[in-house]
Image (spheres, helix red, strand yellow):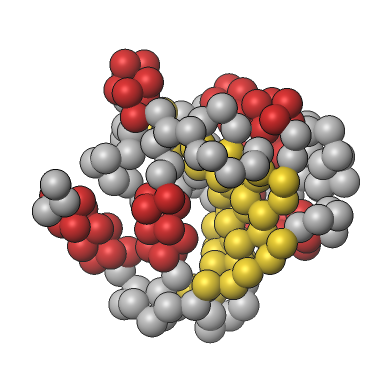
Amino acid sequence: MRPDASAEVISSASYRHDGPAALTLYTMINNRSGAGAHSSVMINGSQRVIFDPAGTVRLSAVPERGDVLYGITPQVADFYARAHARETYHVVIQEIDVSPEVAEQALRLAIASGPAASGFCSASTSAVLRQLPGFESIGRTFFPKRLMADFGKLPGVRTTKLFENDEDDKSVAIAQFESSLATQP
């Protein structure tokens, strides 16, 4: 069962990042096969969230409703990418600046999208993105690498790759991060 945080919890966790309005596509790639494994998108608008359809990274400090993770501080954003980068996967991070209006439209669409079934991460992410002005060239797809390729063709996209050697079990990274949060003042 997916968590479904209350409006009050979501409101209290809301985080507004002072950077430009932007969309950041995360694509998780299997290091052994080269196949795409997962897609999600961070939206930096009036608040910063991650639309993580059918995702499995859950943190007690990050409320979730309908596959939208709220309260994405710089520390949480860094952890999110690093939790996915491990000995068996790396993360391709593609960021593009957008107008505040496009960021708000993306936020509304992600919230309205609701939870996705397992295996529908790229279909749900591409469905949100392709509705945005300037993103019409994004094809609807079930394949993370196809979405990554389409996104990468947009003018102004900045791409980085994150490789780490953590063990394959994401729950270990999640437990370590939760522990570090508990020890902070």
Answer with left or right where residue 171 lies relative to residue 159. Answer: left
Considering only vertical position in the picture, is 36 above or below 25?
below
Task: Depth check: give the residue in front, 17 or 135.
Answer: 17
Question: Can you tell which quarter of the image residue 170 is in?
Answer: bottom left
Question: Which residue occupies 61% across, 62% down?
Answer: 93
Residue 11, x across and y down, in percent: 37, 21
Residue 49, x across and y down, in percent: 49, 37
Does the image show residue 152? yes
Question: Which residue occupies 72% across, 50% down?
Answer: 96
Question: Can you tell which quarter of the image residue 104 is in?
Answer: top right
Q: How many marks?
A: 0
Answer with left or right where residue 141 lies relative to residue 24. Answer: right
Task: Depth check: give the residue in front, 95 or 151.
Answer: 95
Answer with left or right where residue 119 lies relative to residue 133. Answer: left
Considering only vertical position in the picture, is 181 above or below 62?
below
Residue 101, x across and y down, in percent: 73, 26
In the picture, the quarter occupied by the N terminus is top left
Question: Which residue occupies 14% across, 47% down?
Answer: 185
Considering only vertical position in the picture, is 28 above or below 99?
below
The residue lying furthest to the front in this view is 18
Residue 94, x across and y down, in percent: 66, 59
Does the image show residue 121? no
Question: Which residue occupies 48% across, 73% down?
Answer: 89
